[in-house]
Image (cartoon, rainbow, N blue to C red):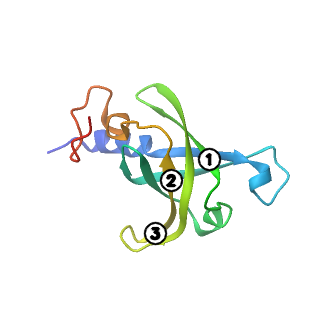
Amino acid sequence: MSDPKDHERRASHRVLMVAWPASYAFDDNPTVLTSAEIQDFSPTGAFLSATLEECERVVPGRILTLHGEMWGVPFSLPGEVRWVGWSDEHERYGFGVAIDREVSLWRLLHSPSAPMGPEGEK
């Protein structure tokens, strides 16, 4: 049986800050930040859940920057929003982001030394 604290620690690593220039948004802030949780991922993209209000501020085709810290290592990943809306599969609102360089989110989410994920990432 897994340690509940380990599950909580992994879950906290799934929350990212998402930033984009204000020219992409509806306000005058130099940078718009919101938080989103990784629900699903592959080496080249992710589905991030967010509130409906947050989703209304995200536009397909825009470039976002995902900021987070995994296992004490900060990272920033640029990505393009591919779609925004309700996901029947995840039963929540969110947006799909294509990451413009291949990364191993499996390793970021589990540990730097984690084995390859179920999809057989290389």
The answer to whether mark 2 and mark 1 are in CB contact below 8 A is yes
Question: Could you say which disc has been placed on residue 92 in the image?
Answer: 3
The residue sitting at 82% across, 57% down in the picture is 27
Which residue is under mark 2? 97
Name the residue at 57% across, 50% down: 80
Q: Residues within 10 Å of mark 2 (few under 14, many from 20)?
A: many
Q: How many marks?
A: 3
- Local crowd size for mark 1, using a 10 Å CA cut-off: few (<14), some (14–19), many (≥20): many
Tell me the SS state at disc 3: strand
- Residue 14 position in % (x across, y down): 43, 45
Q: CA distance from mark 2 to mark 1?
A: 8 Å
Give amino acid for label 3: Arg
Task: Look at mark 1 in the image and give the residue it sits on.
Answer: 64
- First-in-chain label (1 vs 3): 1
Left or right of 8, for residue 65? right
- When the figure is inspected, residue 114 is found, relative to residue 91, above or below; the finding is above
Q: The residue tagged with tag 1: helix, strand or loop?
A: strand
- Amino acid bearing label 1: Leu
Location of residue 82 in the rendering, given as x and y in whole percent from the top left corner: 53, 59
